[in-house]
Amino acid sequence: MLISYPFLPARGVDTTDDEYEKTILDMEMLNAGVYPSSREREWHGGIHVQAPNMIEPVRAIADGTIVAYRLNSELTKEREEDEGGRIDNSFVLIKHETQSDSLQDANGAEQPVEVVFYSLYMHLMNTGEMRKRGIDAKAIHASITASGNTVKPGNGAKIYRKDIIGYPGESYSMAGMIHFEIFTTDDALSKFFVDSKNASEIGTKGTWGDSYFVVKAGSPVRADHPSADKGKISGHRFPTGTPGNVDSARNLFVRIAYRKGVKYTTTWIDEGQDKAPTLLTSEEGIPDDGYEYAMYNIATALYKSCPSAGMELLRMGKMIGPDKDKLSAADTHNWQLVTYASGQRGYIDLADSAVVAHVLSDADFPYWLGWQKHAGGLFGTSGQCDMHDLLDVLKVPHEGEDSDTARQQLRDYFNDGEHRHVREWARRLVCRYPSEWDKANNARCGKLKEKDGLAPGKDGPYFGNDGEYEKHMQFVESLQWWGDVGLGDSNVWHFHPFGFIRQFRKCGWFAEHELAQCIPRVNRHLTHTEFREQSVATWSVACGRAKTWALPFNRMARKYGISTTGQRALHFLAQSIEESGYFRLVKEGGGENKTYNPYYGRGLIQLTFPQTYKLYGSFRAFPKTEIGAARYHEAGWNPDVLLVLNDSHFDANNAADSAGFYWTCPIITAVHKNGLQLSDDGCATDKIIGVSRLVNGNVPIENINGLDIRLQLGVWLKYVLLLDIPTSSEEPIQFVWRRSSQLEPVLDSQGHPQVDAHGHPKKKFYPTTHTLGVLLKWQRP
């Protein structure tokens, strides 16, 4: 599931992904238009987002189809004489249909975890204002055209992530902002959202993101990792802790997360349902530097019966792959250093069911982080919440406050440093309430003309003035559109939009159409001494290849941590797509004629040489009975059966998994480093060249095969996978590589061809500097 934000402004060269994402999250307007309550305690199903400038485009957050839109030519005014009552009523509504995982049903058939939701972009700039500001309306998605005050159906028009759908408009004198909303239906929510307070739902919607553990009260804690030798396991340090026990009355909540090679362990202590849990560590957690990069070595040291299953246990806290039954009972452990009391850390076996009540992931929406559902009770039929009730839900202490007189607003708590966690809890609150954009729900506005309509002693603003109330309602209805788009019941589930996006950006699961976008339509390939444009794959061909590889790729990328960030996926795909001829080939051409036959290249990133095959067979615990032909005796398993016989007969899951193994096994990579480590360094040209050496050989740059394609893919994938926006249809890259696609004669100082001892002409590649424009057109079908 690829998802981004509605504003993606240009960023500085030295701005990290985390810094850039924070600038976007800071665009949420905390002084007005917060979720789920306005300043007047009114239901508010989305958030107001302030654009960095008036001409910053509003972009679709994910692939989908346009349900409906309105593109007006002017502002809507509540009163002609009231300049403050002006508002842009233009909007775009998009339906998104994607996936977050795939699970096997009772019959063993794969069933995708479907994620269907809607994104709404309200208060978009009118066309008259666009003309004044010199904005070309042609920049907007072609299916969104001027409609005046009329709601137009989208007619199923396709739209893609980061496509421009409009520009920020005006709302009650606030210029350069939009109302941004995400909602879904009851049926759709049940297919991807987990109420983790209900233990029977845990794990039923897949596994992705960080790992979480509910550690039972009173559980024992060791001082040392039982497998550590002098504080180390396979060279990685495992410090000594303090023995003891978890609090006898309270459970622990433990999170294990991996960020750029560092393992972070965060612990909360359960304070009961009426209170937020207490952090025993920093929010980020206690770091363990280099743990993720050393995971292959640690897994092979700890889980000798099947390191592959052990790696899943370390990364996800559970085994879900095909090797899960290969791990012996003696190896089924997961000792982790956990803060179990203030200032005290020790080792807890997070694989012991006597110690751990539940193992979760971000796919389970952990409740102690604030994820919870509320179906209308907070706001009732009036659409106005009791602030006490809302603060209770958000776990904010408010003893002695009278919500009717003091009228503390959610906004105040958002801006209060002492209650900063409120912002996070509100971002994880999922509310079911009728849409404010449905005229059928306007009865709740009746309090505006009633005595004491807003609070005891506070009359509605139109009390005693029915005529002005009617004018106001006509203005409100001019903004509403639900009844014109055919969605049915407007009593839907709302997410805090930024909370939803941030959560699913952890997912790392590619739907088939998203993987297909990673295969470009065209490229430029060095032919003789020129870079010539060549066709790569039509959209239908790319979709066919993605259908073959999406599930194997996703499972492999999750297991080895390759899809935890877009940058990691970029590097892996740039290499594996080139190595496999754009997902066409899984066998080294002419491999039978190589000196290392029968251990020639197989897989998406081709395993080569006997020792590599032997290491992979041991890692996966392949059965010795599959040795078959005597020629594979050295490896101990039969690659023709378990991996690749030829490009028409192969095991796609193993062909993908073997690539992940190669990527993260520093023993066999050409530069003896974990591919994740190089991927985390950045994606500039020199970084892609470095990763190319990891895969294709630690050789002089002119000898790296397919470097031109690897570099172009790196640029292409930057715009498919990351938050970056292309500024033109081509992007230049400069690099040193070979002068020609063919070997050229080696000349002596007089310019004469040299020969070897056998009289054969010496030939080599000659390095030269190229400036190549990477084609970014035809990115989508």
Image (tube, helix red, strand yellow):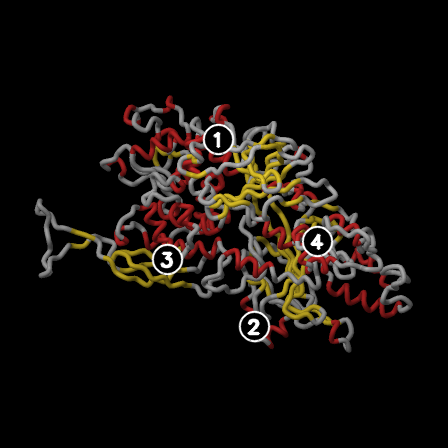
Q: Nearer the viewer, mark 2 or mark 1?
A: 1
- Dot placed on the residue nearer the N-terminal end, 2 or 1: 2
Identified by mark 3, the residue type is Thr
**SS at mark 1?**
loop
- Dot placed on the residue nearer the N-terminal end, 2 or 4: 2
Contact check, label 4 and label 1, Cβ < 8 Å: no
**SS at mark 3?**
helix
Q: Nearer the viewer, mark 3 or mark 2?
A: 3
Q: Which mark is residue 135?
A: 2
**SS at mark 4?**
loop
Q: Which mark is residue 486?
A: 4
Q: Which mark is residue 322?
A: 1
Q: Is residue 484 above or below residue 175?
A: above
Q: Which mark is residue 508?
A: none
Q: Residue at left 32%, top 60%?
A: 735
Image coordinates for residue 445, horizontal then vertical, percent: 82, 60
Image coordinates for residue 448, horizontal then vertical, percent: 85, 63
Identified by mark 1, the residue type is Pro
Q: Residue at left 61%, top 61%?
A: 26
- Dot placed on the residue nearer the N-terminal end, 4 or 3: 4
Contact check, label 3 and label 1, Cβ < 8 Å: no
- Dot placed on the residue nearer the N-terminal end, 3 or 2: 2
Contact check, label 3 and label 2, Cβ < 8 Å: no
Residue 356 falls in image quadrant: top right
Instruction: Please rate how many residues cluster around mark 3, counting C-alpha atoms within 10 Å: few if below 14, some from 14 to 19, many from 20.
Output: some
Q: Is residue 634 above or below residue 471?
A: above
Identified by mark 4, the residue type is Gly
Q: CA distance from mark 3 to mark 2?
A: 34 Å
Q: Please give the residue where the numbered disc 3 appears in the rendered image.
A: 685
